[in-house]
Amino acid sequence: MTNIISLKQTPPKISVIIPYYQKEEGILGRCLNSVYNQTYKYSLEIIIVDDESPIDANEEVCQSQNDAKIPLKIIRQKNAGPAGARNKGLDSITHDTCYVAFLDSDDEWTPDHIENAVAALEAGYDFYFSDIYQLGQDISAFNRAKRINIDEHPHILLGCSFLHHYTGDMAEQIIVGNIIGTPSVVYRYQANPTLRFREDLIKAGEDYLFWLSFCQENNKIAFSSKPEVICGKGVNIYSGTQYGTPESLELMFYETKYRKIILQEFNTSEYSKKYLTNKIKTIEETFLSSLFHIIKSSGKLNLTILLKYFSLHPQFLLNIPLNLLNYLKRKILL
């Protein structure tokens, strides 16, 4: 990779937003060290949004090694979840920020991540993401999921084999087989400075809607086929959401909600619409099955989440007889 600083007399300012809520010491420190160790250190700033974390962000920052003297600020707020924390970070950005990078507090970047992102964005692209290593995996997400054929996307820089111009239907890609990992995203902030994450989607889909909104207006998308993020183990909002738990019902509510929003608010392909409709139907069947399991095992019924789901998806009531029949058939076959 060429020295990116030569591409501009004044290096573009990059704001790194890190939402923070952890229950274990040392996690944020490892995350921050991966930022400090970037090969591209010019005009970086770090914004940590402490979302009422049990482990104080300031203590973690004091124990990290910021030898590069990268400016860092901590913003504290009442717990609002990842979307609310990222929005707080976006609200604090100054007008001179050129690019925004997202990083979760339990994840780490490879040293060349920002350098590669800036190379692509300075070449005229508006949105950048990379392959990642998901938690506990030594095979990257692109290679495991097989949701993208790298050969279909041309290189964007001479002599650089891993930076590509995305040529497909990104909306359909996100809906049917998303390949964008939040901690790998770097985007041109001024292309849509008012865009924010939907805070009503607490447990699913807020990132998908952000990418869809941005990429439908700005279709110059670049990506790296190199894994540039290593996902770590920290607080997981999906913990306790196994089948047959009240938490699983809540997750299915949000899984349904964000898909309905896409159907109502986004112009997508017919294939995407059919996929979303079928997925909502599948979730509906699983919701009923999980509901029966909870009632059978505990004798309790969570009316709050049930009423929320009915309000969001009224067809559920009409489909109960058919879904119940399918549920009983599966039980008999088992």
Image (cartoon, rainbow, N blue to C red):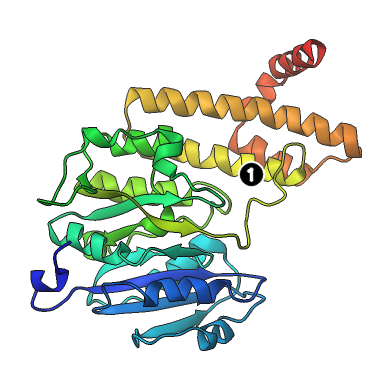
Task: Decide if residue 263 is in sight here.
Answer: no
Question: Percent position (x, y) of residue 159?
Answer: 12, 51
Q: Nearer the viewer, residue 233 or 287?
A: 233
Quadrant for residue 312, please give it.
top right
Question: Percent position (x, y) of residue 149?
Answer: 30, 33
Q: Nearer the viewer, residue 79 or 66?
A: 66
In the rendered image, the vertical position of residue 111 relative to residue 321, given as above or below: below
Which residue shows up at 33% across the image and 48% down it? 213
Q: Nearer the viewer, residue 194 or 118?
A: 118
Mark 1 Cα-neighbour bin, 10 Å: few <14, some 14–19, many ≥20: many
Q: Tell me: 97 left or right of 180.
A: left
Q: Tell me: 279 left or right of 125.
A: right
In the rendered image, the vertical position of residue 259 relative to residue 304, given as above or below: above
Question: Percent position (x, y) of residue 53?
Answer: 62, 74
Question: Percent position (x, y) of residue 232?
Answer: 55, 60
Q: Tell me: 256 left or right of 301.
A: left
Which residue shows up at 73% across the image and 39% down it? 306
Which residue shows up at 63% across the image and 62% down it? 235
Which residue shows up at 54% across the image and 86% down it? 63
Q: Label 1's element?
A: helix
Q: Quadrant of the C terminus?
A: top right
Q: Quadrant of the N terminus?
A: bottom left
Task: Decide if residue 131 is in sight here.
Answer: yes
* In the image, farthest residue toward the right: 299
Mark 1: amino acid: Leu
Counting every numbered tag in the picture gives 1
Q: Identify residue for label 1.
A: 251
